Image (cartoon, helix red, strand yellow):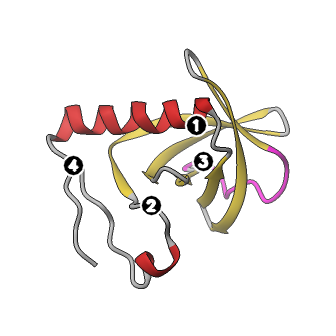
Amino acid sequence: MLRTPIPNDDERRQWPRYLATPSLALSVEVDGEPHACTLENLSLGGACLSFPECDTPAEGKLKLRLQDIGVIRLQRRWTDGRLLGVLFDYSDASLAFVQDCLTRMMTANGPVLETSP
């Protein structure tokens, strides 16, 4: 697992961000309507999601509903075409989701690697 370096990333981020490899297919609810997306990267505080079939939903309440984990409320942070940056709600469900994703990535790719800024 490789941390994705971004210019000035460490100046504004509280937690390291990790590239989601292998990618993880998800479904985000926007006002209750499901939209297929893919996890691109994540940190303890949030994630970048891509929407391959449409531009990102511009408005509406966002939720991830995950079997065995629960519901995670998401706050829209930014959008760029088919990419959506979200903040997690810091619930037990969001922490379990991050732990599950990191475990899957470590199992698939070996030890976690971080790049220096």
Magenta range? 52-61
Label number found at residue 94:
1
Check disc 2 and report the residue beneath it: 15
Is tag 2's residue or tag 3's residue first in the polypeptide sequence? 2
Q: CA distance from mark 2 to mark 1?
A: 15 Å
The reply to whether discs 4 and 1 touch (Cβ–Cβ < 8 Å) is no
SS class of the residue under badge 3? loop
Residue drawn 28% across the image and 79% down it: 117
In the rendered structure, which amino acid carries the disc numbered 2?
Answer: Trp
> What amino acid type should be assigned to the residue bearing mark 1?
Ser
Packing grade of label 4 (10 A; few <14, some 14-19, many >=20) is some
Amino acid at dot 3:
Glu
- Residue under the image location 57 percent in, 21 percent down: 69
As measured in the structure, the alpha-carbon distance from the residue carrying label 4 to the one carrying label 3 is 31 Å
The part of the image, by quadrant, that contains residue 3 is bottom left
Q: Tell me if mark 1 has few (under 14), some (14-19) or many (20+) residues whose alpha carbon lies within 10 angstroms of its own.
A: many
Q: Which residue is mark 4?
A: 112
